[in-house]
Image (spheres, rainbow, N blue to C red):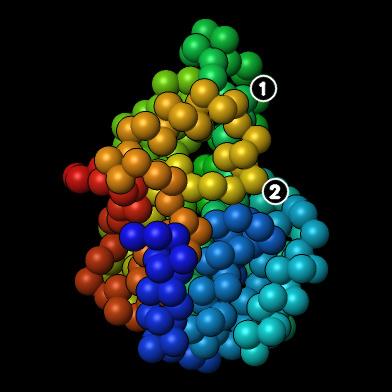
Amino acid sequence: MAAAARMNTVAGHVAAARRFDGQCCIATGGARGIGRAMAERLAAEGARAVALFDVGDGTEAVASLQKLGTKALAVNVDLTKEAAVNAAVAQVLKEFGNVDVLVQAAGITGKTNLKTHEVDTEDFMKVYDINVKAIFLACKAVIPSMLAKGYGRIVNVASISGKDGNAGMFAYSSSKAAVINLTKVMGKDYANVGADLTINCVAPAVVRTAMVDAMPAEQVKYMTDKIPMGRCGDLAEVASTVAFAASKECSFTTGFCLDATGGRAVY
């Protein structure tokens, strides 16, 4: 199916669905890439308010959300600092009243196309801070309000490399494996607490974003060649998978890693 046809199919689904009517959401990494695509999908399906947590300029992303009739707020926050994350969540709760959905896409690849013994330790720790610690901190800050309300959805963006491991991407692949496992633990932690709270993750294969464009071409080719569909994923396709996991429909699935890999992962 051509890209335009795929986009039309996704747009058709959005037109028919209003799964987030009246809900308030947070999207980390929401100023660009997968995070922005997720935020726009939530808004297109009726979210009352969306807050974007990112270190970049969120002005353009906020404007795109407002055009969809959604209240939008960009918060410049270092997601690796607990005090900063707590303050950002407190700001959202004050501004919007509650948080129904937390979707987390903030992440970096770090230096790639390296053998393990060539990996820089400082870069390795930076990848873990942003890809793992930040997800933990945002969940820790948001979950109490979800428990108080009795409802919540959390969706963390992992990666197929967290299942398979990508050669040349030691820090990134192992950090995404951690994201998958912390999601499994959290899903079980809150599966029977008297609240409709599910916590899942999505594992995309390579998707064309600025982060991927900055990687060495041979590394991107290596990842793309592993996809049976023979192409990269679209942002809209990943956002569609996230939208299910973030919706009320996802009520009997928790601690699970959903696939968005063009057939690379069938387990």
**Is 66 or 256 nearer to us in this picture?**
66
Q: Is residue 261 visible?
A: yes
Where residue 59 appears, as percent x and y from the top left, is: 80, 68
In the picture, the quarter occupied by the C terminus is top left
CA separation, marks 1 and 2?
17 Å
Residue 140 numbered tag = none
Q: Amino acid at mark 2?
A: Lys
Outermost residue toward the top in this view:
117
Q: Secondary structure at mark 1?
A: helix
Say which residue appears at 50% left-offset and 58% top-offset. 235
Looking at the image, which residue is at 38% across and 88% down?
A: 16
Judge from the rendering whether residue 14 lies leftward or rightward of residue 63; answer left or right. Answer: left
CB-based contact (under 8 Å), mark 1 and mark 2: no
Circle nearer the viewer, 1 or 2: 1
Figure quadrant of residue 40? bottom right
Position in image of residue 233 (x %, y %): 43, 51
For residue 39, side relative to residue 146 (left or right) = right
Quick one: label 1 or label 2, which is nearer the N terminus? 2
Q: Is residue 241 above or below residue 19?
A: above
The location of residue 140, given as percent across then percent down, is: 53, 59
Report the disc number at residue 81: 2
Residue that sits furthest to the left in the current view: 267
Q: Residues within 10 Å of mark 2 (few under 14, many from 20)?
A: some
Three-letter amino acid code at the position of disc 1: Glu
Q: Would you place residue 232 above or below residue 248 in this image? A: above
Question: Residue 244, position in %: x, y?
Answer: 35, 71
Mark 1 highlights which residue? 122
User: Dot 2: what SS?
Assistant: loop
**Category of crowding for the residue at label 1, using alpha-carbon neighbours closer than 10 angstroms: few (below 14), some (14–19), many (at least 20):** few
Please indicate whether residue 74 sits to the left or right of residue 263 in the image.
right
**In the rendered image, which quarter is residue 152 located in?**
bottom left
